Amino acid sequence: MLGFSNTGKLPKLYARHTGQNDMPDAVRRQLEVKEAYQPERLISNTSFVIFDTETTGLHLERGDRLLSLGAVRIIAGRIHLGDAFYELIDPKGPIPTPSIFIHGITPGIASARPHISDVLLKFLAYIGCDAIVAHHASFDMKFLNHAMLCCFGFPIQNRVIDTALAAAWIRRIEEVELIDPESYHNTRFDAVAAHFGITAVDRHTAFGDALSTALLFQRFINILNRNGVKSLRQLVRIAGVS
Amino acid sequence: MVEIPYKKIIDFFRGIVPFNELPQDVLNSLPQKIVIDYFPKESLILEQDGPPCNYLYIIQTGAVEKAVRKDGVDILLEYRTEGEFFGSASLINVTGPAFNVRAHEDTVCYLLPKETFDELMQNHVGFHEHFAIRVSKLAYRLKKAQTGIFAPREVSDTVVFRSDSHLFNVTAGELVRRKPVTCSPYHEVAFVAKLMAREGVGAVVVVDVRNHPLGIVTKSDMTNRILAAGKTGSEPIRTVMSAPVLSVAPWEACFSALLKMARFNCHHICVVLGKLLQGVISQHDFIVLQGSNPLAVMNDIQKQTTVQGVTRLVSAMDRTVKGLLSSGVSARDIATFISECNDRLTRRIIALTEESLREEGLGPPPVPYCWLALGSEGRKEQTLRTDQDNAIIYSDPEAGSDQDVHEYFLRLAQGVVSGLESCGFPLCKGGIMASNPRWCQPERVWKRYFSLWVNKASPEDLRNSTIFFDFRPLAGAAVLAQRLRAFLNHNIEKNRAFLRHLTTNALYNGPPLGFLRTLVVEKSGTHKNQLNLKMSGLVPVVDAIRVLSLSEQISATNTLNRLELITRKKLLSRDMAEDIKEAFNFIMLLRINHHMMQKEEEIEPSDYIDPKALSKLQEKCLIEAFHVVRDLQGELKARFPESI
């Protein structure tokens, strides 16, 4: 019930923030997310959006912003390559030179790209009511929700699943060796992926990373199923990010 | 939206025949249509005679195996691995798959939907032709498999050789025909004889109250040990039974049971689960199963009365080995079979040589002696007839007779060595043979040699250690060899520094692994672009396991037996031991297969192979195996850190 009362506040938050009452369709869709959530649905038969972001740096509070957003959908355990999402974003600010070597997005490329609010609208339309999945999702969500609050006055309503948490859970169950979880962000995904035998597709583009994460999550669905984690509710309990 | 960066996926397809023939714009549009699916190891992807495929499956990572099921037996057709595909025949013919496709390991596939596939078939001639030919080839292969003349070695991707030959597919448990006939150890002989007659069996198993077998009595025991020995029917059966009994677990292949029976010259073997008796298998059961059996070859050796007779059997042995190889048996079993044959052959030649010396008037051996098998023969790891490595140890003769005794054994050794040579065992180039006076010595000299090698550990001593310390008694008084082994163990225990020297030696050869999981090949010379399977794969394992087992005073010489024993002593983890076993078996099998192929092409057998000539799966397995070898060397280094 709490969920619905929260949802009820969203139009007010939106109106107060933007000064407009008319929500675009994609934003309005967010009002339906909580109601559409079916906790007992089998994860092997659900659709998920697996996404990744590239940012200008690691520190939101020091002015780092989103640079690109990539995603791909898994439906009933299969990755649908045709149902993918990829956008570059104009960060409206300087792109630190060192980060260009990682993601290859130069200021020239970025400034030709749409503003964050347009990208968010497209992204909200794309994810619909699906649960969204990322590796170390809280990092991506910090940037995404910051942008959401700036543009629309409320955060993303979809359930968020973290594959790093799922990996840690699996490690406890199967005693799989993963490398020290405190170590550096980029190596973490590589280590986990290598351990589960994933061939990373195209590292360090938001789409390539999202696809690699999807390949990882695809295996996790199987491993989790084998270990009794079958419903969305169970998945959220072990790997959900709030 | 920005164009999705599918470049890597498009590149993947561009690298695959016949997708490489498609125009760029068609390739670019492919990813849009594709779905990625994941199949955990051993899951069934396509089912024989199941519903027709809706997709063409292209393997992104992993490997799958195709097998047809016929009369309840799976016949392996081939493996498909990264960059290859399956499902095309079913797609084209819109029929159920003609075989089962199972994930051989965790596998990720790109799935190309039927509509897209049909579109490509209609619009691109090269693409169409490729699949048309492929489907007809497959149909041919399937037909061959079903008519039973399928030869697994014609398939390029076959790593493990399998067939429907019964010896390897039927387990010992399946061969048990009836409930075993048993009696208690206190039953009278007369009662057991009646039991045999009533039940119509040739053997009765003597069991305790928990149904654990204690011994076995056969019809021939009845005649030999009772009637011939003048005993009466009131004798308790335990005084005449053979004990302990040979046993085999129900899930083991018949072939393992057969080998055990051959080794101990027994006609019956008990099938036991834990210690509980499940049934009895007799030699007769094998003959019924097989029509003929490898035992016949071994038994024929025993019957020969001249060295020439033995020589003539060699080609029959070769044929049997080839048969075993193409019918899917593990490297260990093949090596065991070869060792068993070679042992019998050697024993027969020794007996015949002793006899001819006697006829020459030299009399019987003046003192007890033992014929030692060394090196790979000592380890029972021979694959081909490799160079002879042998020696003689005899009891210390009484003072004064030294010269005569030495003379006799040298004569014996010369006779045996030349007999072995005529059977196709080349002479040892390093002269490590019993006919070399240095290696035909009394017990006290051998002890002096061994203690010298352990204490001095010069490079030559270490080289000798790796050959001689794998000694095994082959014929004669085994107690001499046992005493020598005890002496050796004691000496090593007193001088642990020797193990560090031996470790340095064992780390000299290593697996040819480069950066980024590649294989390193010779850069120049006769073997350019090749690698040496024996020196870089087998020798490092054998050497490392030898050090570990000598450090624990383990007397076994066979590498896999040593491995089992050091694992029990917790020197290696169970998982690691399993990996080593598989890696060792794989490299060994690859080597045997390589030798057999060279033999067929009448090339001098060598251990060099060109990794490019291997199938993708074989190459992958080889890389994995080499990684295991490297891990093992790491373990060894950690245990004896002062080396290097």
Image (spheres, rainbow, N blue to C red):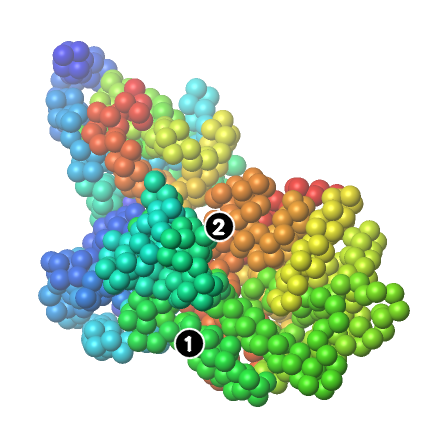
The one nearer the camera, A37 or B343, is B343
Q: Horizontal placement of B64 versus B488: left or right?
A: left
Numbered-mark total: 2
Q: In percent of the image, x 21 and y 28: which residue is there?
A: A232
Q: Position of residue B218 (x, y in %)?
A: 37, 61
Q: Amino acid at mark 1?
A: Ala
Marks 1 and 2 sit apart, C-alpha to C-alpha, by: 35 Å
Q: In percent of the image, x 56 and y 47: which residue is there?
A: B565
The one nearer the camera, B602 or B242, is B242
Identify whether B422 is placed above or below B251.
Answer: below
Which structural element holds mark 1?
helix
- Residue identifier under label 2: B579
Q: Horizontal placement of B217 versus A79: left or right?
A: right
Q: Mark 1 falls within which chain?
A: B
Which structural element holds mark 2?
helix
Q: In percent of the image, x 41 and y 65: which residue is there?
A: B227
Q: Mark 2 falls within which chain?
A: B
Residue B54 at least partly seen? yes
Q: Position of residue B372 (x, y in %)?
A: 67, 66
Of the two numbered discs 1 and 2 in the rendering, the one whose residue sits closer to the viewer = 1
The residue carrying pointer 2 sits among few (fewer than 14), some (14 to 19) or many (20 or more) residues within 10 Å by Cα, namely some
The residue carrying pointer 1 sits among few (fewer than 14), some (14 to 19) or many (20 or more) residues within 10 Å by Cα, namely few
Q: Horizontal placement of A32 versus A66: left or right?
A: left
Q: In percent of the image, x 54 and y 72: which residue is there?
A: B344
Q: Position of residue B547 (x, y in %)?
A: 66, 51
In which quadrant is the N terminus of chain B drawn?
top left
- Residue identifier under label 1: B296
On residue B134, which mark appears?
Answer: none
Q: Are labels 1 and 2 on one chain?
A: yes
